Image: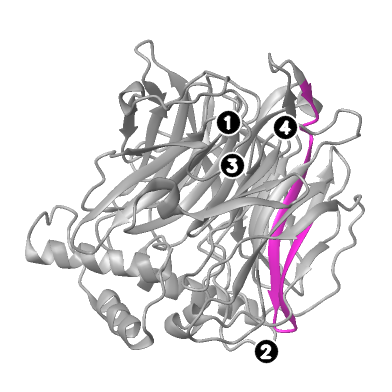
Amino acid sequence: MPRRFAVLATVTLLALALAGPAVSARAGGSRSGRSAIAQAVRYKMSHGYIPIGGPAAYDRYSAQAAARAALLHPSAAPAAGGQNPVAGPSWQGVDEDDLAPPDPTGAIGPNSYVEAINLQLAIYDRTGALITKAPFSTLTGATDFLSDPQVLFDVRSNRFYYLILRVGDETNPISTMLWGFSKSNNPTSIPGSFCNYETDFGWGGTIADYPKLGTTNDFLLVGVNIYPTLATFTGSDVGWISKSTNRKPVTSCPPATTFKTGKVSGILNDDGATLASTPEPAVQTDPSSTGWIVAVPDSTNSGATGTKLELYKVTRNPDGSANIQTTGTPVTVNFYSPPSPAPQKNGVHSLDTLDGRLIRAVSAIDPSHGGAMAVWTSHTVFGGAGAEVRWYEIDPVNATVFQSGAVTDPNLFAFNGAVSPDRAVQGAKLSKRFFGDSMVVGFTTSSSNDFPAVQMVSKIRGNPQSGFVMVTQSPGPEEGFDCWELGKCRWGDYSGAFPDLMAPSSGSTGKVWLSNMWSDGQTDPLAATWRTWNWGAVP
């Protein structure tokens, strides 16, 4: 995500970026084409993600949502009847002072929790004690502009996987994907415990923005939004990389030629004509050669608004390539629209709550629905005091919703949420399977009367959703360099939620591990003031 720039230089670059004309994606090597992509790279480097519809559209619908929020009146929060989740362990994660936001995410394995932020990887034991950490340059050897990290634990191959977008620079935007996996299920050193690769999906000359990583039994799946200029969204692609099924530790890394790769371009909504956006491949808990991707049907590029989500099925062709559905299947949901930016107590600047895009997707068998596969996902939409986290448990086979809910409070803005079920899958043959019908959502809250805070809710089977449970409270507002340079505070861009596949079967529920963002409460126009937090939670 954005590296820190001098204030004057950033303001100048942003003025150029926002004033630049829309240029066709076919501009190629012309001067205007090079200028347009350079502007897009500058925006990516300073803002972190390209909003759906571009900066002007984002400013317009954010202002409209803020105006709607200003007309709302505080009221009593609804009573919550569900059992509250319990945190443990809970600890401060890694941070940096030269970029924002952190893009925190993480995954739990049999022995350790791996956290990824911009621009570091950290490994902790299951108590939260740090084993090691290192910058991505140490992990990958790349020293140019890197962004948007992802990490997961794959139960099928019994190892961690990571993904990082390599942007390149203004004169040579390359949009390749740095990725790799741990040599065993217990990495303890960086880079020694990892195999590292780079895949070019053919996105050079554009920005393959907001990459998200998911899995099937056979593939890694990479969903991206393609932007050749700030004002030109040409569609969303899904790249795929064949995945090793070897569960045993390796001492030497397989050659890159071992892995097949490919992509599908411009996935469509269920009408077969308009573009979908921000595809979220689901991270599998129960291994299957059938995988799922969810997306928003944002064909107008004006912020995610609608009454449906789009669903895409992934299988394996006989030749070993991925068969990815390119025209979506609609899943009807309650109406949603882009959220309002979130105010903060004593804050000069508001917090970015994104544009309604999906944040995270996890698939798991749900025993409360006859052992059917479910896909869990969430996004921040308008609601509550102006922003709420809407979550869904989707029945992908029948393209319906098993259940959905909202993390909402009339007095608080709730945003940057990620949801995960509590599924556990264990044993050498992965035959020991438990839970999967309860969930935890981790998220951020703030308001004009409240500093930013990391909170969570849970829902156990068919019981009501719990109330908000505080995980950590910022001692003051977020007022780091990005707030002063951009006029708003970059927040999260996403958060992490991952099921504990090793949760003991003796309990009544499993466990979920999460990562999110908070602030140290300092005001510093020259450094980042964000921090990250990791925790385990029993629903």
Q: Give the answer, above or below, for where 454 lies relative to 519.
A: above
Q: Give the answer, above or below, for where 179 lies relative to 527.
A: above
Q: Give the answer, above or below, for where 139 lies relative to 253.
A: below
Q: With 197 as the anchor, is 66 left or right in this view?
A: right
Q: Nearer the viewer, residue 345 or 403?
A: 345
What amino acid type should be assigned to the residue bearing mark 3? Ala
Q: What secondary structure prevails in the magenta region?
A: strand
N-terminal of the two: label 4 or label 2? 2
Q: Nearer the viewer, residue 280 or 248?
A: 248
Question: Disc 1 marks which residue?
Answer: 159
Residue 487 x %, y %: 47, 83
Q: Point out the frontmost of discs 4 and 2.
A: 4
Q: Residues within 10 Å of mark 4 (few under 14, many from 20)?
A: many
Q: Residue furthest left?
A: 30
Q: Residue at x 72, y 32 (%)?
A: 501
Query: Does the magenta portion include 455?
Result: yes
Q: Are marks 4 and 3 in contact (CB under 8 Å)?
A: no
Q: Quadrant of residue 505?
A: top right
Residue bounds of the magenta highlight: 433-456
Numbered disc 1: secondary structure? strand
Numbered disc 2: secondary structure? loop
N-terminal of the two: label 3 or label 1? 1
N-terminal of the two: label 4 or label 1? 1
Q: Quadrant of residue 353?
A: bottom right
Question: Disc 3 marks which residue?
Answer: 361
Of the 4 image quadrants, the one containing the C terminus is top right
Identify the disc placed on residue 501: 4
